Image: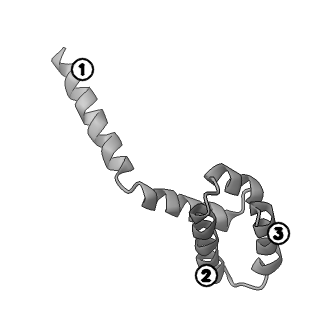
Amino acid sequence: MSVEIVSEIWDAMSDYLCNSDKTEAADTVVSILIDRDISVEEIRTAFEGNKYINEALSVHLDTENPHHDEDEEEYNDFADEFDEGY
Protein backbone atom coordinates (compact mmCIF):
# COMPACT_ATOMS: atom_id res chain seq x y z
CA MET A 1 0.00 0.00 0.00
CA SER A 2 1.43 3.37 -0.94
CA VAL A 3 1.85 6.24 1.47
CA GLU A 4 -0.51 8.31 -0.69
CA ILE A 5 -3.33 5.80 -0.13
CA VAL A 6 -2.65 5.84 3.61
CA SER A 7 -2.86 9.64 3.49
CA GLU A 8 -6.22 9.48 1.72
CA ILE A 9 -7.53 7.00 4.29
CA TRP A 10 -6.27 9.29 7.09
CA ASP A 11 -8.08 12.27 5.54
CA ALA A 12 -11.32 10.31 5.26
CA MET A 13 -11.19 8.82 8.75
CA SER A 14 -9.64 11.58 10.86
CA ASP A 15 -12.85 13.62 10.85
CA TYR A 16 -14.40 10.88 12.97
CA LEU A 17 -11.72 11.08 15.68
CA CYS A 18 -11.49 13.53 18.54
CA ASN A 19 -8.19 15.43 18.84
CA SER A 20 -6.69 13.19 21.52
CA ASP A 21 -7.50 10.13 19.42
CA LYS A 22 -5.94 11.80 16.36
CA THR A 23 -2.66 12.13 18.24
CA GLU A 24 -2.59 8.45 19.13
CA ALA A 25 -3.79 7.41 15.66
CA ALA A 26 -1.11 9.53 14.00
CA ASP A 27 1.54 7.89 16.18
CA THR A 28 0.31 4.49 15.01
CA VAL A 29 0.21 5.51 11.34
CA VAL A 30 3.74 6.93 11.47
CA SER A 31 5.08 3.84 13.24
CA ILE A 32 3.53 1.54 10.65
CA LEU A 33 4.89 3.59 7.75
CA ILE A 34 8.38 3.83 9.24
CA ASP A 35 8.36 0.08 9.94
CA ARG A 36 7.64 -0.44 6.24
CA ASP A 37 10.65 1.66 5.25
CA ILE A 38 8.72 4.73 4.16
CA SER A 39 11.03 7.72 4.56
CA VAL A 40 10.22 10.71 6.75
CA GLU A 41 10.26 12.95 3.66
CA GLU A 42 7.80 10.68 1.82
CA ILE A 43 5.48 10.79 4.82
CA ARG A 44 5.74 14.58 5.13
CA THR A 45 5.05 15.01 1.42
CA ALA A 46 2.07 12.65 1.37
CA PHE A 47 0.44 14.18 4.44
CA GLU A 48 1.17 17.78 3.37
CA GLY A 49 1.82 19.37 6.73
CA ASN A 50 -0.85 17.55 8.75
CA LYS A 51 -0.13 18.70 12.30
CA TYR A 52 -0.88 15.34 13.93
CA ILE A 53 1.36 13.42 11.54
CA ASN A 54 4.14 16.01 11.87
CA GLU A 55 3.96 15.81 15.67
CA ALA A 56 4.12 12.02 15.48
CA LEU A 57 7.12 12.23 13.15
CA SER A 58 8.87 14.56 15.60
CA VAL A 59 8.22 12.18 18.48
CA HIS A 60 9.39 9.24 16.40
CA LEU A 61 12.60 11.04 15.40
CA ASP A 62 13.26 12.07 19.02
CA THR A 63 12.66 8.49 20.15
CA GLU A 64 14.87 7.13 17.38
CA ASN A 65 17.83 9.23 18.56
CA PRO A 66 17.13 10.28 22.17
CA HIS A 67 20.72 11.36 22.80
CA HIS A 68 20.98 13.65 19.80
CA ASP A 69 20.74 16.84 21.88
CA GLU A 70 23.15 15.44 24.47
CA ASP A 71 25.62 14.44 21.74
CA GLU A 72 25.43 17.88 20.17
CA GLU A 73 25.89 19.57 23.55
CA GLU A 74 28.88 17.34 24.34
CA TYR A 75 30.42 18.16 20.95
CA ASN A 76 29.91 21.89 21.52
CA ASP A 77 31.56 21.64 24.95
CA PHE A 78 34.51 19.81 23.40
CA ALA A 79 34.79 22.35 20.59
CA ASP A 80 34.72 25.22 23.10
CA GLU A 81 37.47 23.59 25.19
CA PHE A 82 39.54 22.97 22.06
CA ASP A 83 39.15 26.57 20.88
CA GLU A 84 40.14 27.92 24.31
CA GLY A 85 43.25 25.73 24.44
CA TYR A 86 44.70 26.98 21.16
Q: Does dot 3 land on a helix, a strand or a loop?
A: helix
Q: Residue 46, image x and y in percent?
A: 76, 57
Q: Are marks 1 and 2 in contact (CB under 8 Å)?
A: no
Q: CA distance from mark 1 to mark 2?
A: 48 Å
Q: Is residue 18 left or right of residue 71?
A: right
Sequence-first disc among 3 and 1: 3
Q: CA distance from mark 3 to mark 1?
A: 52 Å
Amino acid marked by disc 1: Asp
Please give the name of the residue rendered at 64% of the width and 71% of the height, measured from the top-left corner: 29
In the picture of the structure, the residue carrying the numbered disc 2 is: 20
The dot on residue 61 is none
Position of the N terminus, as image quadrant, is bottom right
Q: Does dot 2 land on a helix, a strand or a loop?
A: helix
Amino acid marked by disc 3: Glu
Sequence-first disc among 1 and 2: 2
In the image as oriented, which residue stretches furthest toward the top? 86
Sequence-first disc among 2 and 3: 3
Amino acid marked by disc 2: Ser
Please give the name of the residue rendered at 76% of the width and 69% of the height, measured from the top-left corner: 6
In the picture of the structure, the residue carrying the numbered disc 3 is: 8
Q: Quadrant of residue 47?
A: bottom right
Tag nearer the camera, 2 or 3: 3
In the image as oriented, which residue stretches furthest toward the left? 85
In the picture of the structure, the residue carrying the numbered disc 1 is: 83
Q: CA distance from mark 2 to mark 3?
A: 20 Å
The answer to whether 4 is drawn above or below residue 41 in the figure is: below
Position of the C terminus, as image quadrant, is top left
Please give the name of the residue rendered at 72% of the width and 84% of the height, measured from the top-left corner: 17
